[in-house]
Image (spheres, rainbow, N blue to C red):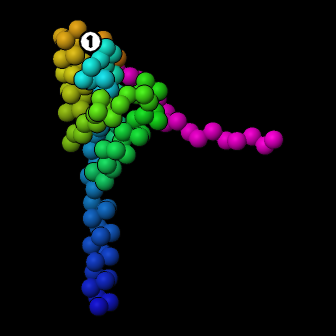
Amino acid sequence: MKQVLTLSLLLFGLTTLAQNTIWSHAIGNWRSGPVVYITPLIETSEAVTKPKLKEQFRAQFTELKDIPDADLDVLLFGTKEEGEESRVSLMRKYGFRKLDVVMLEARPAALPQEKSAP
């Protein structure tokens, strides 16, 4: 029994370490506009879920905070080049539909505010 448990823990540890690096960006207001927001690419891993990435993008970009979940999408890519190509093609696509497209700039993640002593 100890061997099975040890082997299971070892395999679980190896699978978590084997997560590949991927790239992601978000697109907001893509259904209804009038302004479509496209975030810059971020480096992440396969272990991070799309809901977690949505939280991260919302924390980093104030423009995305009030966008409903149905109108905020997170896209994942195997390479940085694929992600950049996606951003450019989305910019053209929504521009062709006569929607304003804002390519957001990279910003540091929002840090929690420290409470000052009374």
The residue singled out by tag 1 in the image is 99
Point out the residue furthest to the bottom here.
Answer: 1
Secondary structure beneath label 1: loop
Q: Amino acid at mark 1?
A: Leu
The percent position of residue 82, horizontal first and vertical second, equals 19, 33
Residue found 31% across the figure and 83% down from its top:
5
Residue found 18% across the figure and 11% down from its top:
96
Residue found 31% across the figure and 23% down from its top:
29
**Any magenta on residue 12?**
no
**Any magenta on residue 110?**
yes
State left or right for residue 85 relative to residue 28.
Answer: left
Q: Quadrant of residue 28?
A: top left
Q: Is residue 1 above or below residue 27?
A: below
Q: Nearer the viewer, residue 78 or 47?
A: 47
The crowding category of the residue bearing disc 1, from other C-alpha atoms within 10 Å (few below 14, some 14 to 19, many at least 20), is some
The percent position of residue 45, horizontal first and vertical second, equals 31, 49
State left or right for residue 56 relative to residue 37.
Answer: right
Q: Which residues are magenta?
A: 103-118
Q: Nearer the viewer, residue 29 or 116?
A: 29
Count of numbered badges drawn on the protein? 1
Q: Is residue 21 above or below residue 82?
A: below
State left or right for residue 92 relative to residue 49.
Answer: left
Residue found 75% across the figure and 40% down from its top:
116
Q: Nearer the viewer, residue 87 or 18?
A: 87
Q: Is residue 26 visible?
A: no
- Name the chief secondary structure element in magenta: loop
Q: Is residue 114 above or below residue 15?
A: above
Q: Is residue 108 visible?
A: yes
Name the quadrant of the N terminus.
Answer: bottom left
The percent position of residue 25, horizontal first and vertical second, equals 30, 33
